[in-house]
Amino acid sequence: MDKKQALEKLRDRFGDRLVETGAARAAHGRDEGGYDGPAPDAVFYAENAHEVADAVKICARHRLPVIPFGAGTSLEGHVTAPKGGLSIDLSRMNRILALHAADLDVRVEAGVTRQQLNAWLHDQGLFFPVDPGAECTLGGMVATRASGTNAVRYGTMREQVLTLEVVTATGEIIETGTRARKSAAGYDLTHLFVGSEGTLGIVTEMTLKLYGLPEKLMAGVCRFPSLSAAIQTVITTIQSGLPVARIELLDELSVRAVNRHSGMAHVEAPTLFLEFHGSPKAVDEQVESFHAIASEYGGSAPEFASKQEDINRLWHARHQLYYATRAMAGGKHVCTTDVCVPISRLGDCILETRADFDAAGIFGTMVGHVGDGNFHTIIAADPHDPVEMQRAEDLKEKMAHRAIEMGGTVTGEHGIGSGKRKFLEAERGASLALMRQVKAALDPFGIMNPGKVVMTDDRDDQPCSGRH
Amino acid sequence: MDKKQALEKLRDRFGDRLVETGAARAAHGRDEGGYDGPAPDAVFYAENAHEVADAVKICARHRLPVIPFGAGTSLEGHVTAPKGGLSIDLSRMNRILALHAADLDVRVEAGVTRQQLNAWLHDQGLFFPVDPGAECTLGGMVATRASGTNAVRYGTMREQVLTLEVVTATGEIIETGTRARKSAAGYDLTHLFVGSEGTLGIVTEMTLKLYGLPEKLMAGVCRFPSLSAAIQTVITTIQSGLPVARIELLDELSVRAVNRHSGMAHVEAPTLFLEFHGSPKAVDEQVESFHAIASEYGGSAPEFASKQEDINRLWHARHQLYYATRAMAGGKHVCTTDVCVPISRLGDCILETRADFDAAGIFGTMVGHVGDGNFHTIIAADPHDPVEMQRAEDLKEKMAHRAIEMGGTVTGEHGIGSGKRKFLEAERGASLALMRQVKAALDPFGIMNPGKVVMTDDRDDQPCSGRH
């Protein structure tokens, strides 16, 4: 690696859009999961794919690591720079390029945020459904295979991407697919890049599927006498094929956190936040079917919000839960983790995890996109108490291994980053060798976001740092 | 390549399940698309993944090509052996291994056919939706990223596979994923193998999503005064978000072929074959909405089949169209091709293709899974008339290039095989280099189904033969 020469060439090429201040570097080596550094050597604010390609070419020539950066809202140390390198910030590439309303698709740059896209689409009667909690970029959402509350009905980023423009590890600009809804033409490069966390290339543009705003939408809450009753309701709802649009579980503590943080007054009990989409008749029928199922498990009559602003408040509060828990945890360090299991195992998985928390005496909220079998814990621990910090880490580890034993995955939507590499090894076994082969083939110099997802031979054996 | 030694070792290991008769070899080098040979050197009837792994290991050591074989129903020369080698026939691996009804998934071996699976599932109230016309194996359907008439509502094989067991090119057995409905854990190896046509490894088992049989199902036909009117009806239906389960277009000639072959008496006009799934109320509402749209374009009142056996006959007739056209074409050679375009371009694409056929004086039926933007032509030409054969080939080529120009793909569901490699190059451009890198990484000896999908350097530069 010839860092000095590489940085010189980058300065020459990009002038004052190559920023080397301590503040910019620090801000780009940090994420919302609590990983903070090591920072990159420099930050480049890219304005188009050709610039990204040029930057990667310079870095490739000098073996300087490249770390793509969107909004920095990832949770598993995706943007740290364990070997230094160049952070390529794509947030200025935030143009919506082309709407094909008749085909229900849109072309955007990677730095567009999901909120920006949906605000822009609203007058067209269309929306983009994937909604992780944060104000993240769509490029970051592709990179981490993100999902959110609507995934139970509409799918995750995996299902929404029609084609990607990618800058490869050697600085070529390629397109991975077409706008056709299906194709049997060759290897599925699109899905190879979705979820690759910037370790195989940098997504610069994408074509995404869109959906018509539902003719009718009902959103509300349903309370349960126990966590178990709420979970059984979810399982029965999904197994019955009811096409619920959102079905989110909040445990008692989560409801308390939401009440405090968002000024709401929900009864503090295990609660499902719900939404139904469809024609007026279809929605009424769905609500009726759901109510019948919930009643069987002692659920309250669903209470629906009547005004759009109340619906918005409800989901905003849900999306803010991570921040709400952080606020309730006082000065404690907060980290979040997620797993996803076959839905038949969801009840055991959540209840055993709750018991682990209680036994360890650790404060944490539990919340989930439970319709997918996916749930999160938000764990608080005192950074000055190494025993408590270790207990929190142990809980995270236990969750991952329990998910594997139950036939599930160590992360439903947060990704691997540097934080979950050891769990990926435990989950993927022999297939990890193939991931390494793919990585070595597409990133021959090992410069793309090193130390994330897979470790390739000795090139990135440095410890993943990031205080977590 | 040391063919003699390899075959000797295979004989030693597998005894009389290694078959080297001319008949078995010829039958395994031929597909339903009219590609006939070159044949493999031997056929191995595998009974489990460990045997497949052992066979691949022997082949890898001696650099003998390996060609996976399911039912031989592929259409683009997927099973020919341009460099000889071992055909691994997976049809005896046809066990249904585990049903997880509560999770709506099933584990099967690669040799199970879709008909076998659905017959087995029927009593459980479940079904598997992907339905290419042929009696094909699920392993072959994974390999070619198959779809069919239900894809408009349920998706293609791409959307149905949760995880695969794969024998790699070096004879390792790996699992690509888990039973969790979503995951952000590492590279998407599952989707890398879906559609890879046996060129990266051999799928031996899979876990597939299942669906509850719809509470109500209505199937029927709707006739139109013109091809254009039928297509406009489809486009408006899809754009309006109507969740139609099947919407298949048959042109006038296709209806005639179906009438003759399946003893039906449909009026010979451009026709949509339709199916609606859902609750009784939802289906009624869908039918009503569809009828309103069709009426605008001069469609007849939809005529619905009242008995299950009539519904079965309707779809059986549709699935038999390829054979029906072949019958109507007399002694002529018949080949089929498919393309897929954004739905806004579907009308132009079909009508311009129809005009090409008329101008060339070539007999061919047109039919399509038009809800996805996907349509097929079944082209007949006299094998003793080189001019007509060339015209048929030219039509196929023109369709592929038109699809590319319209932002679509050269194959929606048939795959690349050896027949469409040049079109893949035209469609994929620079990204083909990445496919080659992936191929070289995962198949270091270039033994996996050589000459299909991508050509890698000089290893498989032999002409794809196959009389087509």
Image (cartoon, coloured by chain):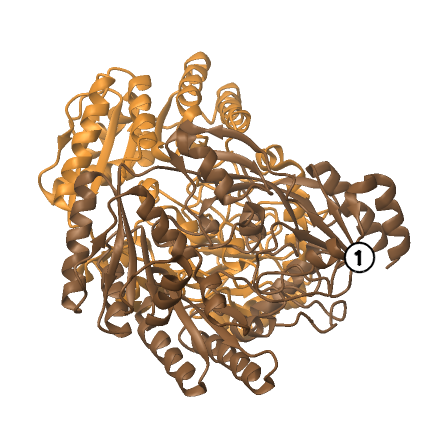
Chain colours: A orange, B brown
Quadrant for the N terminus of chain B in the image: bottom right
Q: Amino acid at mark 1?
A: Asp
Residue B436 image position (x, y, % from top left): 65, 64
In the image, taking residue A296 as reference, residue A14 lies left or right, namely: right
Depth check, front residue: A358 or B430: B430
Q: How many marks?
A: 1
* Residue bearing the label numbered 1: B41
Q: Residue at x 86, y 50 (%)?
A: B7
Tell me: residue B226, above or below residue B368.
Answer: below
Write down the chain letter for disc 1.
B
Q: In the picture, residue A325 is in which quadrant?
A: top left
The kind of secondary structure element at disc 1 is: loop
In the image, taking residue A231 as reference, residue B339 lies left or right, namely: right
- Near mark 1 (Cα within 10 A), the count class, few <14, some 14-19 or many ≥20, is many
Q: Would residue A453 be visible to someone looking at this image?
A: yes
In the image, taking residue A253 as reference, residue B169 lies left or right, namely: right
In the image, taking residue A338 as reference, residue B9 lies left or right, namely: right
Q: In the picture, residue A319 is in which quadrant?
A: top left
Depth check, front residue: B342 or B89: B89
Q: Would residue A96 be visible to someone looking at this image?
A: no
Residue B458 image position (x, y, % from top left): 76, 71
Q: In the picture, residue B351 is in which quadrant?
A: bottom left
Q: Residue at x 61, y 81 (%)?
A: B384
Quadrant for the C terminus of chain B in the image: bottom right
Residue B361 image position (x, y, % from top left): 44, 85
